[in-house]
Image (tube, rainbow, N blue to C red):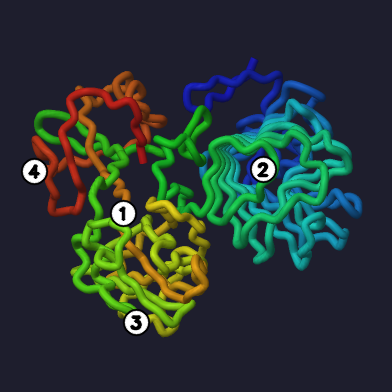
Amino acid sequence: MPTIKINKQVLTFNNIYYVDSTKGLDTNDGSLSSPFATVNYAVTKCATDGDAIFAKAGTHDVTRIAGTYDSGGLWDDNKAISFIGEKGKTIFLCDGTKHSGRDTHCIMFKNAGTRAYQIIFDFNTGNRTLNYETSICYAGSNVSGEVHNCVIRYSKNVSPSLMYGNSTSATIKFVNCVFDVQKNFTSSYSGIGSTTLENCATNFTFFSEATRVNIYNQCTFDSKYHITNFNEVALNIGVYANTYRWNFSSILFKKNDGVYSPITTQKALKENLSKYVKSVTASGGLTPEKTIDGNATGSSSYSWYSSGLPSAWIKYEFNDAIAIDRISILSYYYSGYEGIKDFVIEASHTGQFTGEQSVLYTGTHPNDTTSSFVQYSFPNHIKYKFYRIDIKNIYYGNGNDNLSIVEVQFWKDFDVISLLRLDSLSLENFVGYGGSNPFGCGLINSRQYLLQESDKESTSGLLVSKVESKPLNINFN
């Protein structure tokens, strides 16, 4: 029986039909040497159960034009089909501009045995805006199946919804998928059922529905859908993690005494970056510099306090531009001074904050009378020299309009690129260390002293380290 191997997972099928959108013909037999031209035609050739469709690299228009409610996306015809693509290279176009029905959807699986692996879904909703018109999933009375290590790319500037169904029996499961959208998710219109999001990530925010296991909001991605503000491998999120992860060929560096491969690890900086602040200014009040003195005592002697509010701002200028992705704030009511309530964290290259600044976080500080820090995290890899907390409103603990911030701390997690030493450039060794395509890897012969015996900043900007033992987690990029 024919098989397809995804990483170390060997999948066996009754038949595998191949599709090539540029060289195939629907009059072919669907074999590897004689592929079909369209995925939709391949679906018609699949049996009820046990067949797979392998779509080669390229863009495949899978748009289905059917009824008022069920047009637009990938359709399994109620057959248990496995749709498999080339990692990061196979795109399924679901184009709602090609039909005039009320609704358009992206994924329409009715059979519980249907699977999708390693596909980028390019979903165009046209001019539709309502949650039932533009939901990602729809299949009549039931949406089923599983979607693994796929990207769902939502092209329109509208809030996406996950589900539109006419019953509550939807059981579709998304595992290690990335949702590249342009607004926060909105609620599903109906039929969310036991839908699951597991190890999934989005650059905005998922709606609080469905079964959600280890999901991450506010992610940033590079052009290959690596998550850049979280350690995707360590957290097991996104398309580069878990069983059906995307892996591309590694680049190996060769030195006289060995062969090395890049790995990515997460290094949490365990220091408060406030010590790099050059100056602190505020819109008014006294001693804003006290907010970074390391003393979290609830007293006006160790805090910034101001009156005649409710709005104010405090600005931090660093010695050099620095990337910060977490700020901890200690602000609470005591002795007639109120804590902050609604606020915005902003960053600027110039320090002017007259429209050129970037908004990193908007939120509400809890009304807490205990002296505890509250941490606010946001995706940010840009180095700014100025950061500002812009307070829009305060809590009125005793009816006055006095404000106090006791202490502020700045934090950042850094990705560290290291190099793993391999004993030899052999097929067995390479595969054993996580390589997915040993025959296609690039090999760089370097006569320069790129590798050091200990951590050191090299001239190329890589933090390199000689590693003699195999780490628990390796990310080949």
Q: Residues within 10 Å of mark 4 (few under 14, many from 20)?
A: few
Against 471, is 215 above or below? below
Q: Would you name the residue on which mark 2 appears?
A: 24
User: Left of 10 or right of it: where is 379?
Assistant: left
Q: Nearer the viewer, mark 2 or mark 4?
A: 4
Give the residue pinned by disc 3.
284
Q: Secondary structure at mark 4?
A: loop
- Judging by the rendered image, the residue that carries numbered circle 1 is 411
> Disc 2 marks which amino acid?
Gly
Identify the residue under disc 4.
449
Secondary structure, mark 1, is strand
Judge whether residue 155 can be spotted in this image: yes
The reply to whether dot 2 and dot 4 touch (C-beta < 8 Å) is no
- Identify the residue shown where x is 25% and y is 64%: 302
Residue furthest to the top: 1
Q: Earlier in the sequence, mark 4 or mark 1?
A: 1
Mark-to-mark CA distance, 2 and 3: 70 Å
